Image (cartoon, rainbow, N blue to C red):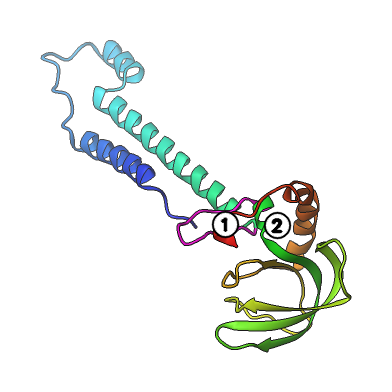
Amino acid sequence: MTEPTETEEARLRRAFALIGEEAGRPGRTAAPADPPAAVRTVTTASRPRRGQRRVRVALAIAAAACAATITVTVAVTADGGSGTDSDATGRGQTFPEALACATAVVEGDLTTVRPAGQGRIQVTVSVDRWFKPSTGPATARFDLADPAEAYATGDHLLLLVPRRKGQIPDAYRGQEVRPMRDRITRALPEAAHTTCPPEFH
């Protein structure tokens, strides 16, 4: 999960500091004389003490800050899992940019996987479908940066081959394939008119 930004952390610190201050504040001094029982009961039920109100406000602020942090984190995580990548400065790609920066997008079965030296592998794909370019040979060989997770002969995957030599390719397997196939199909028309940013060449 993506770490919260400095702004989000500052909001959380302020909210929790307010809670701590109110929790440690002494209660209001007692009234000089106790009111009759009936009045005391109504007052207790209808008017929370000032300290209680402040603690509730502080809790509401903290809850809002936490909700904002969770929302931002979920949004970043969802985008980060979409097959995009970042350059050395942390600049992310949009999905159409990721497709524009791909030299090939194919779906098929891996028939061979070989180490190619210097942190690279060579894979051969028996292609079921070409997305980019729209057509190609039945068998394609790609020289790729070695991914963190191993490829194995027989794997069925949807593969985005990046233009930048050192960039890890995006590969989708199993239940990921169908939704990603649909997403690629929808995004290809926009990607055809999208320029690959220079930092991803």
Q: Identify the element where label 1 is drawn.
A: helix
Name the residue: 31% across, 38% down: 15
At label 2, which amino acid type do we have?
A: Leu
Q: Is residue 58 left or right of residue 31?
A: right
Structural crowding at the residue carrying mark 1, measured as other residues with C-alpha within 10 Å and reported as few (<14), some (14–19) or many (≥20):
few
Give the percent coordinates (x, y) of residue 47.
32, 17
Name the residue: 46% across, 39% down: 68
Q: Is residue 159 above or below residue 27?
A: below
Give the percent coordinates (x, y) of residue 200.
58, 60
Tell me the residue that label 2 is attached to. Answer: 99
Q: Which residues are magenta?
A: 83-95
Q: Is residue 26 left or right of residue 37?
A: left
Numbered label tally: 2
Give the percent coordinates (x, y) of residue 141.
77, 80
Structural crowding at the residue carrying mark 2, measured as other residues with C-alpha within 10 Å and reported as few (<14), some (14–19) or many (≥20):
many
Q: Is residue 144 above or below residue 37?
A: below
Give how far apart the Cα atoms at labels 1 and 2 are.
14 Å
Tell me the residue that label 1 is attached to. Answer: 198
Q: Earlier in the sequence, mark 1 or mark 2?
A: 2
Q: From the viewer's perspective, is the residue at label 1 or at label 2 nearer? A: 1
At label 1, which amino acid type do we have?
A: Pro
**Between residues 198 and 77, which one lies in front from this camera angle?**
198
Q: Identify the element where label 2 is drawn.
A: helix
Q: Main secondary structure of the magenta part?
A: loop
Q: Quadrant of the C terminus?
A: bottom right
Q: Is residue 146 magenta?
A: no
Name the residue: 30% across, 43% down: 13
